Image (cartoon, rainbow, N blue to C red):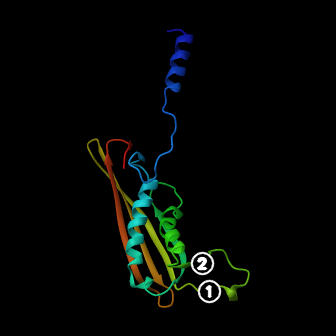
Amino acid sequence: MNKFSLLACAVFIVGCGTPATYKDPQGRELVVSLDKVNIQDFATAGSQMLQSMISSPSFSKGAPVLRLGTITNDTADNFDTSLLLSKITVPLVNAGRVTLLDNEPAADASARPKAEYVLKGKILEDRSNAGSTRQSSFVFQLTLVEEKRGVAVWTDEKIVTKQGTKNAVGF
């Protein structure tokens, strides 16, 4: 095969890709990666945990002052854990269910309200395989701690498990 034929084949292969398109983030046509947490994993776990949290007695009276604690990422993938927190805090704040403290220090500390609760957690993973089938489970753990007494008043764990032989499109 001459150089021109090789170049023509390379251009043909590169030019035959699928163009990028927008997809519904709640839809069923999203990329599912076995090796990492996808945006739909955060949405699934966050939505379920939000429903569990707002049914907690801690949210039955007023809008408690909430501070975000540390969410530890104990997975092999490097990602911003605020993706999970925003799935919970955005609806809570916008519905007036909590007052969220800014983690930046205030200029006038005396005017800053004290946190009544701290939300903290961990994201873990477990991977296994059998033959050509691979499975990845991501465990999302959150705990709401009452600052004054230092006790957990709500805790939840959601597991998102994906299985396949390779990464795919689907939800």
Residue 69 shows up from this direction: no
Circle 2: element type? loop
Q: Amino acid at mark 1?
A: Pro
Image location (x, y in percent) of residue 66: 53, 80
Q: Is residue 103 visible?
A: yes
Q: Which residue is mark 1?
A: 113
Residue projecting furthest to the top: 2
Reading the image, the residue beneath label 2 is 101
Percent coordinates x, y for residue 83 in the rendering: 51, 61
Residue at screen point 39% across, 81% down: 56
- At a point 69% along the width and 89% down the height, the residue shown is 110
Q: Is residue 155 above or below residue 109?
A: above
Q: CA distance from mark 2 to mark 1?
A: 8 Å
Determine whether 73 is above or below 8 in the image: below
Q: Residue at x 55, y 78 (%)?
A: 67
Residue farthest toward the left in the current orientation of the protein: 130
| Front in this rendered view, residue 127 or 61 | 61
